[in-house]
Image (cartoon, rainbow, N blue to C red):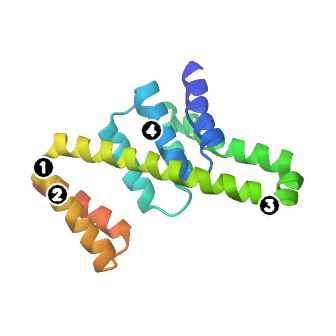
Amino acid sequence: MLLYWQIFLAFFIPGILGYGGGPASIPLVENEVVVRYKWMSVQEFSEVLAVANSLPGPIATKMAGYIGYELGGVLGATIGVFATVAPSLIIMIALLSLLYKFKDSPKVKRITLFVRPVIAILLGVMAWRFFFESYEGIGFLHTIIIGVASYLLIERVKIHPAFVIVGAFIYGGLLL
């Protein structure tokens, strides 16, 4: 029973604090899953994140479903997904009229402007940790090859990131 409560908290708290959607809550989920509860290593979390990014739909719910399932089966997945969407659901039900009333407020727009750089920094720190873990795990040369190839394929050739992730999995499976 304690495990299910921990799964709930691990995804509910980032759901409350992750203003800005899935990308904003990813570093918070990583902190809960990797640092606080130690359910996964940084490498395992980055792999779950890569797979979740390649699938359609909201990233936070896909990660919650997968991690919850790995830890507690179908009930764990259900609790994880519910915990991810519960903060938004509660806020939308309780504050819908208030949000609608102040949606064009200059203060609300200003808060949003201040939150965006914080999200960018959190994502940058997480990317740095992923790079460092990759460097330690597979070495500098393979990290650079995968990073440069991914950049070129996504930004220059305009290949969908899902195909690049599959290609990186194949590269890792064959050469690592």
* 157 lies above or below 52: below
Give neighbour class at mark 2: few <14, some 14-19, many 20+ (Cα, 10 Å).
Answer: some
Amino acid under disc 2: Ile
Which quarter of the rendering shows the N terminus? top right
Helix, strand or loop at label 4? It is helix
Amino acid under disc 3: Lys
Instruction: Say which label, 4 or 2, has the lower sequence index.
Output: 4
Q: CA distance from mark 4 to mark 1?
A: 24 Å
Q: Which circle marks residue 140 in the picture?
A: 1
Q: Which circle marks residue 144 in the picture?
A: 2
**For residue 124, side relative to residue 116 (left or right):** left
Q: CA distance from mark 4 to mark 3?
A: 30 Å
Q: State the residue lying farthest toward the bottom.
A: 157
Image marks 4 and 3: residues in contact by CB distance under 8 Å: no
Helix, strand or loop at label 1? It is helix
Give neighbour class at mark 3: few <14, some 14-19, many 20+ (Cα, 10 Å).
Answer: few
Please tell me which residue is depicted at 27% across the width and 73% down the height of the picture. Answer: 153
The residue labelled by disc 3 is: 103
Image marks 1 and 2: residues in contact by CB distance under 8 Å: yes
Q: Which circle marks residue 30 in the picture?
A: 4
Helix, strand or loop at label 2? It is helix
